[in-house]
Amino acid sequence: MALGRLEIVRREPYAGGRAFGDAGAYERIDAVAHYEVDPGHPANAPIVDLGRAERDDDGRVRFRGDATFLVPVDPGRANRALLFEAPNRGNRLAMRSFNMAPFDLMPTDEIPAGDGFLFERGWCIAWCGWQWDVPYPSVRLGLRAPAVPPANRKPDGRMQLRIQPDRAADAFALTDHHVGSVGNHAPIPPLDPEDPAAELWVREHLSDTPVRIPRDRWAFARGEGDAALPGPGSVSLAGGFEAGRIYDLLYTPAECPVVGAGLLAMRDLAAWTRRSADSPAAGRVDHVIAKGVSQCGRLLRTFLHAGLNRDEAGERVFDGVHVHVAGGRRGEFNHRYGQPSVQPTPSLGHRFPFADEPQTDPRTGRREGLLDRLRAAGCVPKIVYTDTSAEYWRGDAGLTHRDLESGAHAGTGPGTDVEPPAEVRRYLFAGTQHGPGVLPFTDRSMFGSRGANRFNAVDYRPLLRAALENLRAWIADGVEPPASVFPRAREATAASREEVLGALAAIPGFALARSDRLPSLAPMDLGEHADRGVPALPARFLGEPYPSSVSAVDADGNETGGVRMPDVSVPVATHAGFNPRHPESGGGGQILEYLGSTVPLARTAAERAADDDPRPSLAERYASRDAYLAEVRAAAERLVEGRRLLAVDVELCVSLAGERCDAVAGPDA
């Protein structure tokens, strides 16, 4: 194992020593993991620039990262499974995902217990710092990655920083901004602030041809009145950056970390935690399940594609992998000057392959599947992919189960569906947005953006809990999970985005995106060194985008091609996975990253008639609130019968639906 030692920095009772059901009390351990990897070992060959990094006298590359563990005090009370989560931008998300803990805008050192779901079931939990640009020191978990000296950076590359402001600003810090203040990463200064080859481009929409901004109009410096960092830690533009416009800054950074060291940290800490007698989880773990949400789901897709599920000792690392809301993308997790937070910027993470099994890209002739390297090595884990409607509407999730060789158009025609392999289950949570929906209704997001509609309010976390428990039972007990559910052409549950926009157009008050301004993926030329992890940026697109498919919708505008929460199958609103930008944010007709829409039904027949709403009103559907909740309960119990919901969560679903019914119907209903 390539983890040299674990330095414990804090060890204390978790949650004040609270006992969680049969699992009892838990202990929290915070640590620094010290890694020492062999750059010449075949298991490490996929890591870009590892062989160019600085080495110690013994020839090994050393680096360190943060780690946190929560384990039952009594090893005999553990359920023998370790949930190994990649922190999202340094933040521990498992409690939000599974324990119904609240969403915090600002990161803290606290790990809230929520409703105790994971603890009462005896899970061991570990978090591994893997992201090199998380600020340090911090309450977030990060990685101090090894560096590549300037002399070893040939052929050299550069970084592409994309900025689409939600409001006008004079300057921006040199770090990813697509998640607003939720990111707050360490800035990435340029090698030469006066570099004449650095470029800044602007366009109105994704499909427009960009225009280069003259070099004397912008600088690596602070803008007047803006909160960006001084000097080369920020970029300023004469006249300021305009809301909604898309800016691309290209430059060579001063530092060159081995970005893919984060993948090795995930692998090696998980292997050590499972097998070492010195592990905080020693005597408690037989099975390890990796978990990644959003950015970290894309990280895990990159991990799978690279074939990294065997360590330097040749041992399997993860028995299972739960990839949540990654869609069909990977990310900037293993290339030179990679920014791990980036998602919308076209680069190596947007490239084919998208599906697990091999197919041929008809545009490039390349034949590949996401799991090819793992299958060749005989270490394919059990995998559960869960996506929301948002990943479909951004144009990539549908590619994971689509036959690109058929030549058929989005979501239509025979032969377009690709079924997952035996080791994989794939589920769309119908009518949902990237993150679980919350109340009260709002059109302003935690990212600082504003939507043209109220954001999607469906909280799908009960489905996540069942998916995780089904994955554990599959690994530990051999009980196969329920069949995959995703939009299929042959079942008429898949459609093109244009078809669905047409169906939704009849709903009054529903602001719709423009079909010609929706995001998509396309074949790209990233230069002759792209396969070595040194892309030539910006990408040069090769022809038309790949086809995009989404779920078809029913007469209420709610999706039919996925697992439906009772909120969706027994509706009080139409729920969608997209939300256009508000006019005040610019970028008209484009959709916001990650966010969906909820458009309530009319309360009465009179209101419906006045608005010419084709959807029956609440009063026409349900005789009373109690009658509505009875239908919700029946829908939840059907999900339990199909093992898509845990029996203990029926009441949770009824409660969630009741809250949303009250929010739509009003206090006097």
Image (cartoon, rainbow, N blue to C red):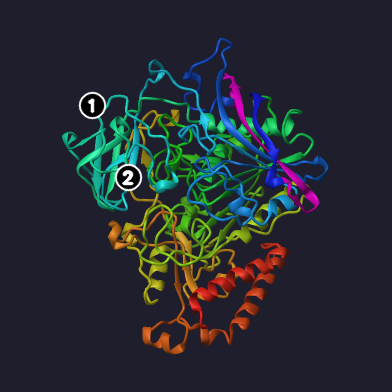
Extent of the magenta region: 17-43
Q: Residue at x 55, y 41 (%)?
A: 87
Q: What element carries label 2?
A: strand
For the view shown, which residue lies furthest in the front direction?
16
Query: Which label's residue is closer to the chain start, 1 or 2?
Result: 2
Q: Is residue 444 left or right of residue 139?
A: left
- Count of numbered circles on the image: 2
Q: Would you place residue 631 above or below residue 397 in this image?
A: below
Q: In which quarter of the image is residue 339?
A: top left
- Tell me residue 66's x, y (percent): 58, 32
- Tell me residue 366's x, y (percent): 46, 39
- Please tell me which residue lies in front, 67 or 46: 67
Q: Can residue 648 be seen in this view?
A: yes
Q: Distance between the residues labelled 1 and 2?
A: 21 Å
Q: Can residue 420 be seen in this view?
A: no
Q: Which residue is drawn at 56% across and 30% down?
A: 65
Q: Which residue is drawn at 61% across and 46% down?
A: 111
- Tell me residue 150's x, y (percent): 38, 18
The label shown at residue 163 is 2
Please state, as top left, top right, bottom left or bottom right, where the N terminus lies in the image. top right
Q: Would you place residue 308 above or below residue 517 in this image?
A: above
- Tell me residue 234's x, y (percent): 30, 36
- Please tell me which residue lies in front, 659 or 509: 659
Question: Circle 1 is placed at which residue position?
Answer: 194
Residue type at mark 2 is: Ile
